[in-house]
Each structure stands twice: as C-alpha cells, then as structure tokens.
C-alpha cells in the first residue's frame, strides 16, 4: 500500500508541475530575436503623461487621425469640435481627461495603446513618407508587425540612400532622437568620386556654409582612397536636409553611395537590407540617455580629430624602422641613433692555431 501511495503522489506532483509550466508559457511575453524584449513605452513618454494639457493637433495625431500637419489642416477647415463647439485656432490646448474632442461625428479618446519602436535597414528606392497617394515603396510598409498601428519615420533618408531608419508612434521619443539640439550621433558610410585630399576633409570637419547656415562639423575617418573614389566614415550630430550630399558637393565631390550604419548605440550588425526588428526597452532608454547627455557614444567622442598622416610620412616612417608613436623629447619620424656595432673578426688562417693568432700590425 505504501508503494501505491508514493506512486500516486509522484503522478500528482508531475501533473501540477506540467500545469504550472504551461501557465508560465502562456503568460510569458514573446521574445524578439534571441534576448531582446520589445519596448512598449519610454521614459520620455511616461514623463509627458503627467502633463494634463496637450496641443490639439498632437492629441489628434496620437489618436491616429493624421500627421500633426494634417491635423492642423483639419482644424483650420473647422472639422474638429471641442466640447460641441468648432475649433479653428491652431495651438489650442485641451485636457483629454475632462474635455471631449469630436471629428466627423466621432468622439476621440486618449490612445493609451502600447508604443512601438522599430529599426529598419532601408534599401534603395524606398521613401520615408506616410502619404497614402505615394506610388513608390514606403518605409512604413516594410514593417509587417500586426500591432504597429500608425507609425512614422524618425528623421529621413532620401530615396537613393540606404541604412538604418527608426520608426515609431511615440512623438516624444522621435523628437528627442531626431532634433539637432539633442545631438544624437549618426554615422554614415560615404563613397565619393575621386581622391579627396586632406585639406577638403579638414574643411568638412570644421564646418561648411550652407543655405541654412554653417554646419556643426563632422567626425571623418578615411577608410580607403584611390584615384577613382574615396570611402569615408562620417559622424554627424545634426540633421539638415541631405546634409552629407550637399557638404561634399560644395567641396566638389559627388556622393556615389550613402549608407547610415549607426544611430547612437544601434548598428546594422545582424540586420540585412530590407529587414526590421523591434527595439528593446534598454535600447530605447540608451538613445534617450544619449540625447540627454547622460551617456556618451564611443564613435562620437571626438567629432574633429586631427587629420591622418599623409602616405609619404607613413612610408618615411617605415624606412626609419616603423617609428609611429611620439616619445618624450623626440620628434615623430626622427632618425634614431645607430647602435655601436663590433667590428667583424678576422678569420684565422687554416694552418694557424687559434691561440697563436696575432692581433694588431705584424
């Protein structure tokens, strides 16, 4: 009888363990990739929730009506009602908790749905727009997530450019990452026609005058230079319209290929062209800390480094024994003093004993 009881207890505990494991499986959220969990909000978004009054066009955009510019057009046309009265003044602020906003006979409520953050490796020929009448492929159409809702791109990449592009429905996050005053660094792999000299690179590092004003400068590393083309790594902290192409065109060099390889801590590693993935909460917060200046990116610590030595200097250093580091009291490339060498021994005659060899004049 004792054996039967122990067998029953073992079977019951096994069933309980299986039920507990199945419940944990059902409650566990889905993973994105191997280790990342998709972000559903951000600290920037949570901070804005404490503010009661919001702009009317922003409230409409958060409800998924249209973009802020499109919402402004709806307000000016008198299609938006606030507490039963039409509103036509731009910049009107509302309290979503106490006031009622209506458009086309439908009452809108605050959209407290979870926020989405996506990273896309944009291919060439895709445009960054939400215009429904656009016939070319759109970046938002490449995001195939079911719960994406109405999303938009954070900043822009022109049609011929490729590389990383952020898409989200969180306006506060997009503002902090894209606006130039927050200075989130973005790195581009640029290939220009011809061999670009060091003098032109130094001018780009210091800043070039464009129609909007002077650029803030850039960090430039030379990856490869030939007579036909030059490949560079360019890091910027601002986002003027087509800035990279316009800056190099101003210097007389046409950009052949342009790829955004990094946005802060995010890179194209493991993300093929045309593919996308959801950002984790840690990645979203890392971008926000970078925008607040609480975190520094390794790729942008020095946006104006000293120019690299010319090829003639490198070849000269190799001939001098590979002196590349500057030592105290010595100049880079300076010739080292030759060490004292012992004179070669005179070979003794084959029939002369080694102990009787004569040294000096005979």
Image (cartoon, grey):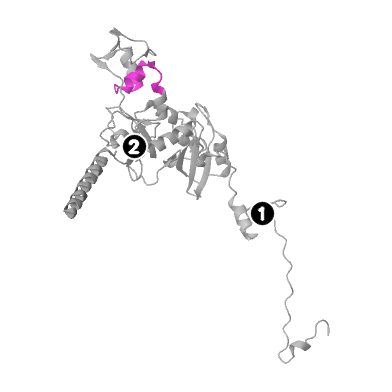
Is residue 64 within the magenta segment?
yes
Is residue 271 within the magenta segment?
no
Q: Which residue is mark 1?
A: 333
- Quadrant of the rendering where the C terminus is positioned: bottom right
- Is 55 situated left or right of 227 in this image? left
Report the residue at 74% width, 81% height from top: 346
Answer with the quarter of the image where residue 52 lies: top left
Q: Residues within 10 Å of mark 1 (few under 14, many from 20)?
A: some
Report the residue at 41% width, 18% height from top: 51
Marks 2, 1: nearer the viewer: 2
Q: CA distance from mark 2 to mark 1?
A: 53 Å
Viewer-side residue, 55 vs 268:
55
Viewer-side residue, 196 vs 184:
184
Answer with the quarter of the image where residue 38 lies: top left
- Is 209 situated left or right of 339 in this image? left
Q: Which residue is mark 2?
A: 38
- Where does residue 268 sit, x and y in percent of width and height? 40, 44
Span colored in magenta: 48-69
Q: Residues within 10 Å of mark 2 (few under 14, many from 20)?
A: many
- Compared to residue 242, the image places residue 22 above or below, namely below
Viewer-side residue, 355 vs 109:
109
């Amino acid at each position: 009888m004792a054996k039967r009881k122990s067998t029953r207890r073992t079977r019951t505990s096994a069933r309980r363990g299986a039920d507990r494991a199945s419940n944990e499986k059902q409650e566990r959220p889905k993973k994105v990739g191997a280790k990342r969990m998709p972000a559903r909000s951000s600290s920037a978004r949570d901070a804005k929730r404490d503010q009661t009054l919001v702009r009317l066009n922003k409230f409409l955009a958060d409800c998924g009506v249209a973009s802020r510019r499109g919402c402004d057009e709806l307000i000016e046309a008198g299609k938006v009602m606030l507490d039963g009265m039409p509103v036509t003044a731009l910049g009107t602020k509302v309290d979503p908790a106490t006031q009622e906003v209506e458009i086309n006979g439908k009452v809108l409520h605050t959209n407290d749905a979870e926020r989405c953050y996506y990273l896309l490796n944009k291919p060439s020929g895709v445009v960054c727009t939400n215009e429904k009448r656009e016939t070319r492929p759109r970046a938002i159409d490449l995001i195939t997530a079911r719960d994406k809702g109405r999303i938009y791109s954070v900043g822009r990449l022109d049609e011929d450019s490729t590389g990383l592009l952020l898409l989200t429905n969180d306006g506060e996050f997009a503002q902090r990452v894209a606006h130039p005053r927050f200075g989130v660094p973005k790195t581009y792999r640029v290939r220009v026609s011809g061999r670009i000299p060091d003098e032109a690179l130094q001018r780009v590092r210091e800043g070039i005058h464009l129609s909007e004003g002077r650029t803030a400068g850039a960090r430039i590393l030379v990856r490869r230079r030939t007579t036909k083309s030059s490949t560079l790594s360019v890091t910027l902290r601002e986002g003027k319209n087509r800035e990279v192409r316009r800056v190099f065109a101003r210097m007389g060099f046409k950009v052949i290929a342009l790829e955004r390889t990094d946005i802060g801590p995010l890179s194209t590693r493991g993300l093929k062209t045309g593919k996308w993935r959801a950002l984790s909460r840690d990645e979203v917060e890392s971008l926000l800390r970078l925008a607040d200046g609480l975190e520094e990116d390794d790729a942008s610590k020095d946006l104006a480094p000293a120019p690299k030595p010319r090829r003639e200097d490198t070849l000269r250093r190799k001939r001098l024994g590979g002196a590349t580091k500057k030592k105290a009291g010595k100049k880079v490339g300076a010739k080292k003093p030759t060490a004292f060498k012992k004179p070669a021994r005179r070979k003794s005659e084959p029939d002369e004993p080694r102990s009787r060899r004569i040294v000096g004049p005979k």
